Image (cartoon, rainbow, N blue to C red):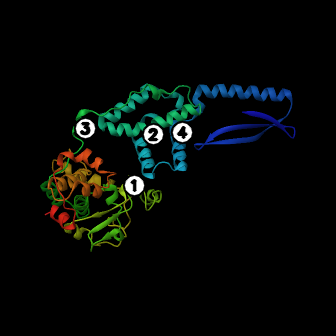
């Protein structure tokens, strides 16, 4: 902070954090310049500064989190998908504890409560994904002197449990998939079938357009993913049309078996394969996930989730020994074969055939 004389009036010159960006502010204080008035202004500023240090500048957690998100959007260093995940996780798991609290009021106990509450009902990975942006918000709070000490430094790291690692992959059997397909409505039936025949992530499947599909050559181009919240069209506007994929390798061409053709033949007036009753695209896979969970609960498959159909695609193709692990890896959109081996090594057997015929045979 600097005070100076301009045209007989005292002005201030200060750097401030506004919407996540550090800006220089110069403005008139409307006080006539004199040594007496200057001393008074400086004294009032020091008193205000000391008070703000005590109360953490009166900035709330949600305000600082919003500034952090704005900062990340402007930097464009992380994907839109990641930013959406940060918002979803923080609002779901952190806001119930910290919304309305000033940064200086938040304690280690508050943060530990958040951690234990997440771990009680969710995986340790969910806890780590939530605490990743949370730690960065507190790092910013310390950097910009909203707090004197960072309580996050005293929160123990979140580690995976052995049991969680052992149960990470839970594929269905083909018979179970066929059973569930017979018990579903048209839209969910199609979603389950294409998840099984394509092996896409649910967020990728819900974003496929009819124009992405080449029926003659039995392939579909994966260009985008929808992982928004339940905000309909407004949320979709925030997602780049040709983006929001998990990794660079997620943008890929997938070959599908002939059994998938009936589900990939245009049957609505939308440009998307999956759409609402008024032909609008879904903003995410959430509706299908909820419907699928209800179906699983009804028929006693409660230890599964929608994503397990993707695991089923991988396990079926690797176990049947018809197409190679390398092609399965590319179909899944993995960064490299190591990623595939990391999750599906137990299902892999030898194979050398990477033709459309082999893909058709895999689902006979």
Q: Which residue is mark 4?
A: 64
Of marks 3 and 2, which one's residue comes earlier in the chain? 2
133 w.r.t. 296: above or below: above
Cβ atoms under marks 1 and 2 closer than 8 Å: no
Name the residue carrying label 3. Answer: 165
Could you tell me how far apart the alpha carbons at marks 3 and 2 are, in whole angstroms?
23 Å
Residue at the spot 18% in from the left edge and 53% down from the top edge = 318
Label 1 vs label 4, nearer the camera: 1
Q: Earlier in the sequence, mark 4 or mark 2?
A: 4
Locate residue 56: give its quadrant. Answer: top right
Between the residue at mark 4 and the residue at mark 2, the CA separation in whole angstroms equals 12 Å
The answer to which of 207 and 287 lies nearer the viewer is 207
Q: Residues within 10 Å of mark 4 (few under 14, many from 20)?
A: many
Which residue is tagged 2? 133
Can residue 275 be seen at all in this image of the molecule? no
Is residue 103 found left or right of 245 in the rendered image? right
Of circles 3 and 2, the one toward us is 3
- Give the residue number, with chain letter if any, for mark 1: 248
Look at discs 3 and 1 and give the one toward the viewer: 1
Q: x and y percent of residue 175 in the render?
A: 12, 56
Answer whether labels 4 and 2 touch (C-beta < 8 Å). Answer: no
Task: Single out the residue that lies furthest toward the front.
Answer: 352
């Amino acid at each position: 902070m600097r005070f100076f004389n301009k045209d007989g009036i005292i002005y201030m010159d200060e750097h401030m954090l506004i919407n996540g960006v550090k800006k220089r502010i110069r403005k008139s204080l409307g006080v006539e310049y004199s040594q007496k008035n200057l001393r008074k202004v400086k004294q009032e500023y020091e008193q205000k500064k000391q008070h703000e240090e005590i109360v953490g500048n009166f900035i709330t957690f949600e305000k600082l989190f919003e500034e952090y998100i704005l900062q990340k959007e402007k930097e464009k260093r992380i994907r839109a998908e990641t930013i959406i995940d940060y918002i979803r996780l923080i609002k779901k798991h952190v806001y119930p504890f910290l919304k309305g609290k000033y940064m200086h009021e938040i304690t280690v106990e508050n943060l530990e409560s958040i951690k234990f509450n997440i771990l009680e009902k969710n995986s340790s990975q969910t806890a780590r994904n939530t605490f990743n942006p949370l730690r960065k918000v507190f790092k910013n709070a310390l950097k910009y002197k909203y707090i004197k000490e960072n309580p996050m430094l005293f929160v123990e790291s979140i580690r995976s449990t052995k049991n969680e690692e052992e149960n990470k992959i839970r594929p269905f059997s083909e018979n179970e998939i066929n059973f569930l397909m017979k018990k579903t409505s048209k839209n969910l039936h199609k979603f389950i079938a294409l998840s099984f025949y394509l092996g896409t992530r649910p967020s990728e499947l819900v974003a496929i357009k009819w124009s992405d599909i080449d029926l003659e050559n039995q392939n579909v181009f994966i260009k985008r993913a929808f992982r928004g919240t339940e905000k309909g069209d407004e949320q979709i506007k925030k997602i780049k049309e040709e983006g929001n994929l998990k990794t660079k390798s997620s943008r890929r061409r997938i070959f599908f078996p002939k059994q998938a053709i009936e589900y990939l033949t245009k049957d609505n007036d939308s440009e998307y394969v999956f759409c609402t009753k008024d032909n609008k695209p879904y903003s995410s896979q959430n509706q299908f996930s909820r419907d699928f969970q209800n179906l699983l609960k009804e028929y006693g498959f409660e230890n599964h989730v929608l994503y397990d159909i993707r695991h089923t695609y991988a396990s079926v193709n690797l176990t049947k020994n018809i197409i190679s692990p390398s092609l399965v890896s590319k179909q899944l959109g993995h960064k490299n074969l190591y990623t595939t081996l990391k999750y599906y090594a137990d299902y892999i057997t030898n194979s050398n055939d990477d033709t459309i015929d082999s893909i058709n045979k895999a689902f006979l």
